């Protein structure tokens, strides 16, 4: 049997459902936060799959699970994987499908071709979603040596448990986090659901990611003056809400004028004192702006900033802006993108190049290795909800592309 025949929809479905049984939520959801009992059970299941395949299984200092198939020539590894932690609640596919994909790809290659020339590894990463500790890519950051020494005692979940405490509860020692760092990964390949509607709109099962979006979160505070809503004439108001409305519609307009894939979102706002008959004195809101290419991204940020300054000045408002989060775009390795594309072509699987509008572990892994990503179609473009769904058929096609590419790299 060929690798594509070994990776069939039925096998994919069985593995996805087996993982989904740990932390199952409602009919189709999953609630599986890092270091919870259900998360540990899911990681144990991945470890047992790897062991059954005859891989050398290990758990690193932050709890990432690794399955290693030694190459006859050794050298830096070809790694595939993703994460099994979820949103609260999330669906069965975000992250989990990428871990299943890595296991099934290595299984098919081992079965069909035997030991590889170069070492192949499966990895199941932890706390990608930041749904428990807001620890942003905890597992992949540990691998690239990107966790600061103060972080384990400075990150807390909603019930006040530190990530250091949570690690100890599953037998991990936070002091050993630096030991999770790896400098011997050649390429990291991640299969993931698209989480948006682009593949569905194009009528394609598979996407090959050329870049992961850059993004910036900015907090904007506009300060004016509280006044009586009836007695104060319009002309002499210092109204931060009117200013915020202008900034918000203008910023959304900036992204619309620039066109896809630029996106700008205002998702959070606070008004003080938040009363019906009072002009507010303070309005605070956030802007999330994204683009996968550095130049238009910088232009988008600049146009938002210019807008804020000019609105504040014209309206006599004080404007205080603070950058909360800033991720540069991550360009996938062009050779890996070409290999993935060639694999899809060879298998007769229709695919397109695209960008990722969501963040992924790959962008962290890119600090120390080449990265490539395979997307598979999300039905209705839905994700971060129990309603997210990818057909087993589409998933199998994506995994076949992944396995064919790994064959090219490792054999
Ligand atoms: Zn994910």
Image (cartoon, rainbow, N blue to C red):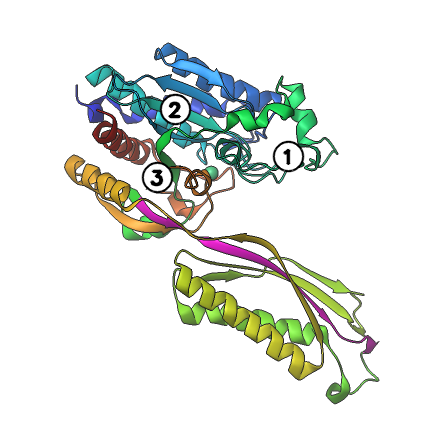
Where disc 3 sits, the SS reads strand
Residue 20 magenta-drawn? no
Classify mark 2 as within 8 Å of ligand 1 or not, answering yes or no.
Answer: no
- Is 226 placed above or below 174 here? below
Q: Which numbered dot is residue 149?
A: 1
The answer to which image quadrant residue 409 occupies is top left
Q: Is residue 328 found left or right of 277 in the rendered image?
A: left
Point out the frontmost of discs 3 and 2: 3
* Structural crowding at the residue carrying mark 2, measured as other residues with C-alpha within 10 Å and reported as few (<14), some (14–19) or many (≥20): many
Name the one closer to the observer, 275 or 236.
Answer: 236
What residue did someone put label 2 on? 122
In the displayed structure, would residue 282 be above or below residue 27?
Answer: below
Q: Residue at x 67, y 76 (%)?
A: 242
Quadrant containing the N terminus in the rendered view:
top left
Q: Nearer the viewer, mark 3 or mark 1?
A: 1
Q: CA distance from mark 3 to mark 2?
A: 16 Å
Q: What secondary structure is found at the residue carrying circle 1?
A: loop
Q: Which residue: 78% across, 70% down?
A: 276
- Which residues are drawn in magenta? 208-228
Q: Residue 233 falls in which quadrant of the image?
A: bottom right
- Residue at left 46%, top 36%? 94
How far is the residue under mark 2 from the one under mark 1? 27 Å
User: In the rendering, at what x and y percent does residue 237 appear?
Assistant: 76, 83
């Amino acid at each position: 049997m060929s690798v594509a025949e070994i990776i069939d929809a039925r096998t994919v479905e069985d593995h996805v459902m087996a993982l989904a049984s740990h932390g199952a939520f409602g009919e189709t959801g999953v609630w599986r936060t890092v270091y919870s009992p259900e998360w540990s059970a899911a990681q144990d299941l991945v470890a047992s799959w790897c062991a059954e395949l005859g891989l050398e299984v290990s758990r690193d200092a932050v709890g990432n699970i690794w399955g290693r198939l030694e190459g006859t020539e050794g050298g830096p590894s070809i790694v595939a994987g993703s994460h099994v932690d979820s949103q609260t609640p999330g669906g069965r596919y975000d992250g989990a499908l990428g871990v299943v994909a890595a296991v099934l790809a290595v299984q098919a290659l081992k079965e069909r071709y035997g030991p590889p020339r170069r070492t192949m590894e499966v990895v199941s990463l932890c706390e990608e979603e930041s749904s428990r500790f807001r620890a942003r890519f905890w597992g992949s950051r540990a691998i690239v040596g990107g966790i600061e020494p103060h972080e384990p005692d400075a990150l807390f979940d909603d019930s006040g448990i530190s990530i250091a405490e949570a690690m100890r509860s599953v037998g991990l020692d936070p002091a050993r986090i630096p030991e999770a760092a790896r400098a011997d990964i050649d390429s990291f390949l991640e299969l993931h659901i698209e989480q948006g509607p682009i593949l569905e709109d194009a009528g394609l099962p598979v996407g090959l990611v050329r870049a992961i979006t850059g993004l910036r979160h900015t907090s904007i505070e506009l300060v004016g003056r509280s006044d009586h809503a009836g007695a104060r004439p319009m002309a002499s108001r210092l109204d931060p809400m009117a200013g915020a409305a202008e900034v918000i519609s203008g910023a959304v307009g900036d992204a619309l004028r620039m066109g896809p894939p630029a996106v700008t979102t205002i998702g959070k706002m606070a008004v003080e004192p938040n009363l019906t008959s009072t002009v507010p004195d303070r309005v605070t809101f956030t802007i999330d702006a994204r683009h996968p290419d550095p130049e238009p991204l910088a232009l988008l940020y600049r146009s938002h900033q210019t807008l804020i300054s000019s609105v504040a000045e014209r309206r006599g408002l004080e404007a205080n802006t603070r950058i909360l989060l800033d991720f540069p775009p991550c360009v996938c390795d062009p050779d890996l993108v070409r290999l993935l594309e060639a694999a899809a072509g060879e298998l007769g699987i229709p695919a397109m190049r695209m960008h990722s509008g969501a963040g992924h572990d790959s962008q962290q892994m890119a600090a120390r290795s080449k990265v490539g990503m395979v997307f598979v179609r999300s039905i209705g473009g839905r994700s971060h909800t129990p309603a997210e769904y990818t057909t087993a058929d589409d998933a199998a096609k994506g995994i076949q592309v992944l396995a064919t590419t790994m064959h090219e790299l490792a054999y």
